[in-house]
Amino acid sequence: MTPPLWTAAEAAAATGGRARGDWAATGVSIDSRAVAPGELFVALTGDNRDGHAFASDALARGAAAAMVSRLPEGVAATAPLLEVGDTLEGLRALGAAARARLSLSARVIGVTGSVGKTGVKEMLRAMLGAQAPTHAPERSFNNHWGVPLTLARMPADTEFAVIEMGMNHAGEIAPLSQLARPHVALITTVEAVHIENFADESGIADAKAEIFDGLKPLPGGGAPVAVLNADNRWLDRLAQAAARAGARVVAFGTGAQAQARLLDAEPHGAATVARAQVGGRDVVFKIAAPGRHLALNALGALAAAEAAGADLARAALGLAEWRPPEGRGARWEVLLGEDAVDGAFLLIDESYNANPASVGAALEVLAATRTEDGVGRVARGRRIAWLGDMLELGDRETAMHAALADHPALARIDQVMCVGPRMRALHAALPEDRRGGWFATSEEAAARARRVTDAGDVAMVKGSNGMRMARVVAALKAMGRARDLGAPPEEV
């Protein structure tokens, strides 16, 4: 029988709170709508929302108990509760206690970066999960409540933990790292993301380097490890910050100075096969998505896994289990008409977020993806990019949007459909033969999607979260029967 994640006595000791009732929780949740029977519901307060108003609903859904700072309305005084002074602080304390109770052999990997951190986190989950009990957040829980929640959910027998850390401003990652206390810190890259909150890009590099603040020596006393992108212009600045934290630097990239070096990466249909050297050893690995940038991310993850003591060969094999998450490169074949009598088109869903670096990488993937001729209304299959605004770019946003028109990948892209007021700059800068429509909102773009796309085409959708480009993805899927190309084959 699986032991409980938290007993009432353990949770009270961890938080300094007072437990009512003798309960045991199998998990931790902050969402009353998704709380599972047996979980501890944490009534967080903030952003014009008070979780105490939903404590009664959570208990009615079968929550083992509720962490509260006061007796919520509609909840009996005899209900199973954990009373604390502040529920967010209580969640942090629970996370700290979960980190502290790990075995001395357990290893924690912290992941941050301007681009690719969630995908790398999932790659590490795939690499490490087959080797030992591994814990990582199910989604992008990487902020001031997401990291404590991830840690609070961590079972005591965890041997590998992967903790994702994100930020919008300086000073946000340091407390997360100090809570997670990683042995290995991986920074995927530093780019002009959230640049409106910084004086310049060097400030972003320094904010990412805060992940070194919580570094702890490896089990057995070895120096902590910082895994850094050798191809990034901020390598030296990051390496100096890592050295000040007492970390050993392992660089990954394509140059000769990289200890983990990508030798080649070739697309094979919907996959990429890569060859690399890691610590002087030859490694071949395959990932279930095309893209050299993804192969580089996977290489960084391999370097981090090895630094944490994982078996490198088994980690490379484990990569075969990784699939691009929804909104981050997931691929769909949309079958048109009854039994696909009208053909099909390929949809690449990159709708989760966008910045100049990630849009450029997505355009390269689109440009390299094969179309099919002679199967639709239009004789030749086309590559169509649906691009929504890139947000939080500050005073340079107009120039950064327009600059996408000069990206080399556009030479192989047939139409660019621009969505949002900032993307008007790209629309104006595009060559006339590649200039598709411009739409003020993703809702307007979604209404047009059916009339633009045809059998044999490849459509790629990308934009910042606030643009809700998932509406365009949904509209394209609704044109027919969408088949997830990343899912395991259906049994016959």
Image (cartoon, grey):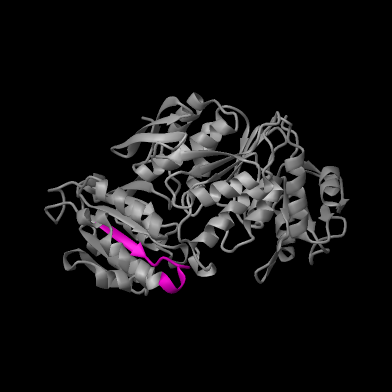
Residue 108 to residue 48: above or below: above
* Residue occupying image coordinates x 68% and y 47%: 214
**Is 145 left, or right, of 312 in this rendering?**
right
Q: Is residue 107 magenta?
A: no
What are the residue bounds of the magenta stretch? 384-396
**Is 405 left, or right, of 282 in this rendering?**
left
Which of 389 and 275 lies nearest the eye of the viewer? Answer: 275
The quarter of the displayed image where residue 166 is located: bottom right
Which of 193 and 210 lies nearest the eye of the viewer? Answer: 210
Name the quarter where the C terminus is drawn.
top left
| Residue 323 in view (yes/no) | no
Residue 404 in the image, given as x and y percentages of width and height:
31, 63
Residue 395 in the image, given as x and y percentages of width and height:
44, 74
Name the quarter where the N terminus is drawn.
top right
Q: Is residue 388 magenta?
A: yes
**Is 171 left, or right, of 469 in this rendering?**
right
| Residue 101 in view (yes/no) | yes
The quarter of the displayed image where residue 191 is located: bottom left
**Is 450 left, or right, of 158 in this rendering?**
left
Residue 88 in the image, given as x and y percentages of width and height:
74, 59
Residue 341 to residue 70: above or below: above
Q: How many marks?
A: 0
Which of 75 and 330 lies nearest the eye of the viewer? Answer: 330
Residue 449 in the image, given as x and y percentages of width and height:
29, 63
